[in-house]
Every structure is written in structure tokens, then in C-alpha cells.
Image (tube, helix red, strand yellow):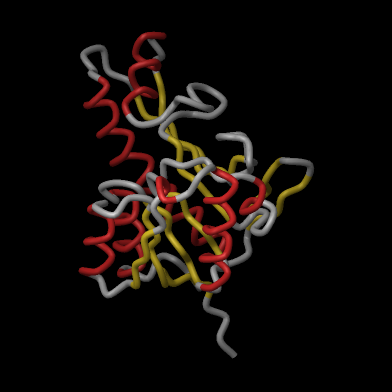
Amino acid sequence: MNNTKNIVVLVSGGGTNLQALIDAQARGELGSGKITCVISSKANAYALTRAQNNGIKTRTLIRKDYNDIAEYSIAMRDALLEEKADIIVYAGFMTILDENVCDAFVNRMVNVHPALIPSFCGKGYYGLHVHEEALKKGVKVSGATVHFVTAECDAGPIILQKAVKVLDDDTPETLQKRIMEQAEWKILPQAVKLLCDEKIAVVDGKTYIK
């Protein structure tokens, strides 16, 4: 009996988090999961090249080809169902999908956010903006959070978090790089493995790792 879980990764840009997942898979660190498809919201995303270089199927679903987020979300839901997605990973995916997708894949979609939620999260907090705000506030630690995706931005149950020290001379760029290397690229594959191996329970909006 084949218990392999199909992992579909959603991307919009360079795909560094996708690469972390591909590398983890190559090391046998995704448990019963296998990346079967990468779907990009932008036609020229370098993440698509990373997938193709590793023999992974790619699709594009261009956000601007759709009138609104509801229409786009329905198209994405249909694409995910076509790909028989068991687990969906946002890896630098820049579109907030609505309940048309989220309700179809409850507790099966995960995102990595470059801060310790509930700090520096929600609408508008993406990319370098997150690190700019963290440095403005003078926080001593930041980090990354892997959480389940819900229709509300960055509000789903938290799966894993990892703290990263903020240095006095940090710029948004140096902090971003350190959080990626020390936190995002480590906890995203770990969380995906836990999910694929059915080790996460969600009770009253909180996760418990079995």
C-alpha cells in the first residue's frame, strides 16, 4: 500500500524555501512526503527553474489572469485537487487565498513566516517589511514561524517556531538572510515531515506534536 503524501508547493519568487524542501527531500527528511508539483503565481519565478532542475512538475496560475481573489482561489483549489495534493506548502507565495481553498484543505496547508508570530505578521508584513519593522522596534530576537494557513493572514495554528538573535548592526537584509538560514530552512522541512507523518493534532486552535 502506498502511503506517500503528495506535497504541492506554491511559489511566487526565487524559491529559496522550495530549495530547502527539495534538499530535505534529497536527504530523506520529508518522511512519507514527496514534492509532486510546484505551482507559481508568476510566470517568471525562478522557483519554477529550481523545480524543473529537480524533475518536479510545474504549473503556473497567474494571479493577474483572474478578476478577483475569489475567482483565483477557486482556480487554485481546482488545480490542487487535480494534482491530488495531500499537503500544500506556501514557500514565498505572495497571494492570500480565501476560504474556497482554505476550507477544502483544512490543516493541510502550511506557510513559513519570517517572524515570531504574533509579532510582525498579518497583512502587509511580508519580505523585507517584516525585518524593517522588527529592527525599528529594537527587538533582541526574531525568527520564523511555520503555521497552518487559514483565510485570515498569518492567523492559523502555529506548528513550529525558532528564535534567531538580532545583532546591533543588523540591516533588514542581513537579518532576513540569518532568519532564512538559521530558522526558515530548518523548521519548514521539519513541519512538513511532521504533517506528512500525521504527527500534528490541532485542538481548539492549538497544535500538539505527537
Residue nearest the viewer, comparing 137 with 48: 48
The image position of residue 189, as x and y in percent, is 42, 55
Report the residue that reaches farthest toward the bottom.
Answer: 1
The image position of residue 199, as x and y in percent, is 63, 60
Which of the 4 image quarters holds residue 197? bottom right
Report the residue that reaches farthest toward the right.
Answer: 204
Please give left or right for residue 88 compared with residue 169 in the image. Answer: right
Please give left or right for residue 190 compared with residue 52 in the image. Answer: right
Residue nearest the viewer, comparing 109 with 21: 109
The image position of residue 119, as x and y in percent, is 52, 22
Residue nearest the viewer, comparing 34 with 181: 34
Q: Is residue 33 above or below residue 149?
A: below
**Residue occupying the point 41% across, 14% down:** 139
Q: Is residue 52 above or below residue 123?
A: below
Q: For the image shown, how many numbered marks are present on the structure?
A: 0
Which of the 4 image quarters holds residue 134? top left
Residue nearest the viewer, comparing 182 with 66: 66
**Residue occupying the point 67% across, 46% down:** 207
Of the 4 image quadrants, the one containing the C terminus is bottom right
The image position of residue 123, as x and y in percent, is 51, 27
